[in-house]
Image (cartoon, rainbow, N blue to C red):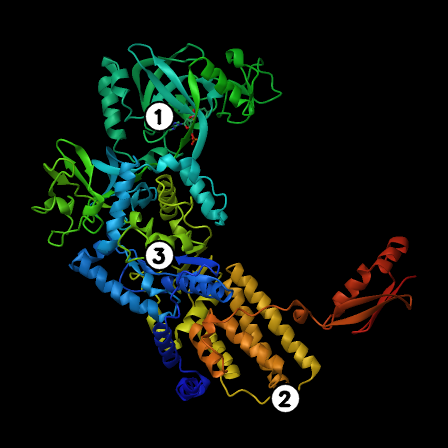
Amino acid sequence: MAEARQAGAEGAAEGGRYDHAAIEARWQARWEADGLYHATVDPSRPKLYALTMLPYPSGDLHIGHWYAMTPSDARARYMRMRGYNVLFPMGFDAFGLPAENAAIKRSVHPREWTYRNVERMRGQLRSMGAMFDWRREAVSSDAEFYRFTQYFFVRLFQAGLAYKKHAPVDWCPSCNTTLAREQVWGDDRHCERCETPVVKKNLDQWFFRTTQYAKELLDFSGLDWPERVRTLQTNWIGRSAGAEVAFARETGAGEVRVFTTRPDTLWGVTFVVLAPEHPLVSELTSAERRAEVDAYVQQATRQTDIQREAADREKTGVFTGGYVRNPASGERVPVWVADYALMTYGTGAVMGVPGHDARDFAFARRYGLAIREVIVPEGEDAAAPRAQLEAAYSGAGVMTDSGELSGTRVPDDMPRVIAWLEARGAGRGVVTYRLRDWLISRQRFWGAPIPIVTCPEHGQVAVPEDQLPVLLPDDVEWRPTGESPLKLHPTWSRTTCPTCGGPATRDTDTMDTFMCSSWYQYRYLSPSYADGPWDPAEFAYWMPVDCYTGGIEHATMHLIYTRFFTKALRDMGLVPHSEPMLMLRNQGVILGEDAEKMSKSRGNVVAPDALVGRYGADAVRAYLMFFARWELGGPWSGRGIEGTSRWLNRVWALAAGPLPAARQVATATTAALRRVTHQTIKRVSDDFEAFQFNTLVAALMEFTNALGRLRADGEGSAAWDEALTTLVKLLAPIAPHVSEELWQRRGGQGSIHTQAWPVYDAAAALEEQLTLVVQINGKVRERLSVPVDVDEASARERALACDAVARRVAEVGAPKQIVYVPGRLVNVVFA
Ligand code: ANZ
């Protein structure tokens, strides 16, 4: 206490403003010294693992980081005051292209650049005053971290979930590396990082079998995740149920298999289309068609899938000269090559049903292919001649001209169609997903080396666990050349085979950095633990993550990868749970003052450091929670922070001075103080539960104003003391420094951040009521309990709604007149 009092002089600054710089520095140092935010295993208390997405060390912490992290911190603090043992860690996603590209631009070694930034950002993160447990910090480019990133790669490899394949991949010519499908954006298919259009390249690449988990990834049961993210993931995974149907080749052995979601239209097939990359194109092409087909295939493969898929694009193709047999009708069907068939989906072959599919319709029109209707809308006469089709009919209906299946109602009876195909060996029901396997290899320097060696005798051999990590060498030309930098090192890749000891070579690619962020939540539990990726005791207590917060932009990459990862670990028996993060909440994006995305080139970037210097971290935190709905974000306004800062100073003015002498005050004042206090407890608690940070700050501002009005009448009463203590406690998660200072000045014991959250008293929060007499023609009929501040409109409304009056209205119609005596009675006069 003595210490706190003494600090008082230092805490007060001129102009009625508190000295935020002194207060914040002092409390940060004190919390650090006391280990206030150390989270330790304590089975006697319920645990809460609160996680906010880790930043990559870009150089400077920007306002977007504050916007994401400070409300997450406030909520973690709230949960701590609610009695949870809260773990709230922080670290750095330190490997990967962003750091490497920045380093290249500045001609600094990526390691040096990364660790310099990590150091700087640590300092900036500390200025937030967040409850990060820094003992848990994990940096993904540290050898003791990536040792386990490699360990997991090996485990996935051993489980058959990692494989190498020669595959056409998206290559960014500017970043000089392959990209995952998810890192390619827009119609022009540009690189997510540098916006250069990607090109296709054939390379030997490592993949993880994410597709093996496609079905399970669609199941979100038990997860409290935003609808929007679930939808994005569901669409990304893209489940399609249908059938694979085999069309036998007319000449030569084998068959062309197609994937269709409409096996009911099989009798309407008038052609089959192969993707230009389909392996059977060459075999099916007749001698006289070869030159034309080859030329078409050549130009088509230069296009990207997205260009080829564009709905409004002219459908082009060429006839191969080859034929297949329709397994249902036995008909002879011409085979075409067309670029609207994608090799990356289904089987890479499509049965053309122009009567019922819009793309096939456009194609048939263009090339004069037959168009046949085999589904007619219910109630229409199948035999009646129909006018020439203007468009494909894709709706429900009845199968017609379809052999034994004619008359089948679809889509309802689709299972019957599939059973029929299966019984005749012509096809089988299948489910297809759009999700692709995760491309892991990067031809870049700044990542975890892939821990596989290739032996002429034993092929691909995993580096044994006790030889991990495979360290990233420092003496290498890391500037991009188009080759993996590790390949250019004179000796690095030369090694011996773990199996036979003979000469072998290391894989010279590094891993996609999403690999690191797929498991960092586990490493935080025990970042210096050496006997495994985590300390089992910490794991048993803390996992899974209870509340995860971060940007919606991670909906389909990181958040699918990390779910895949945990499911794969579960199947290897490494973790007991199926989902890494039980609850997810996303913040929106904070824009520049000009409502544009913040970027250095636009010059609209808001630097938090300057704001912290001017207003203090508490004001910046509170303002970021207040200025927008968190999940929406919005344009920054520099002016608003002034108001938030003034509010904190008003709180200071109310609560920082010496405690007033005790005195008795009017009962009504006590009731009013308790009412607003408990109403605010309820509002703030509910809003914390709902992540409604802007309205909870607003509630505290209103509370502060109300206390300003009640001060003269209420100061010195027990209710006044309760109100101020409550205000300071409710403020603690938002503005941790100033609330701590006020708590100490008011004689609080221990840190405010270890106090229990105020308990809501519903009775105290009740609005004061008065009795409103309802008369009919001057005779008392009912007495209603209404709030003291009831206005005339609602008094009349309530009187009209009460039983006696409503009954009379039903009998004789509307009243002639209504007389209101404020705060006392309503007389309803009927004729
Ligand atoms: C015949 C048919 C008739 C089709 C009809 C649709 C309507 P979703 O729903 O997105 O899964 N398709 C199959 N593989 C393809 C490929 N590799 N490239 C381009 N298109 C392909 O789409 C499934 C439908 O897309 C399949 O069903 C197939 O056309 C086409 F009235 O088969 B359908």
The crowding category of the residue bearing disc 3, from other C-alpha atoms within 10 Å (few below 14, some 14 to 19, many at least 20), is many
CB-based contact (under 8 Å), mark 1 and mark 2: no
The residue singled out by tag 2 in the image is 663
SS class of the residue under badge 3? loop
Q: Nearer the viewer, mark 1 or mark 3?
A: 3
Q: Position of residue 54 (x, y in %)?
A: 34, 57
User: What's the residue at 27%, 27% (across, down)?
Assistant: 277
Q: Position of residue 420 (x, y in %)?
A: 49, 15
The residue singled out by tag 3 in the image is 525
Q: Nearer the viewer, mark 1 or mark 2?
A: 2
- Left or right of 217, for residue 461: left
User: As shown in the figure, which amino acid type bears the numbered disc 2?
Assistant: Arg
Dividing the image into four equal quarters, which quarter contains ligand 1? top left
Q: Quadrant of the C terminus?
A: bottom right
Q: Give the answer, above or below, for where 406 lies relative to 414.
A: above
- Left or right of 280, for residue 796: right
Query: Which quadrant holds residue 822?
Result: bottom right
- Left or right of 479, for residue 757: right
The residue singled out by tag 1 in the image is 347
Instruction: Residue 414: give its label.
Output: none
The crowding category of the residue bearing disc 1, from other C-alpha atoms within 10 Å (few below 14, some 14 to 19, many at least 20), is some
Q: Is residue 551 visible?
A: no
User: What's the residue at 37%, 69% (across, down)?
Assistant: 128
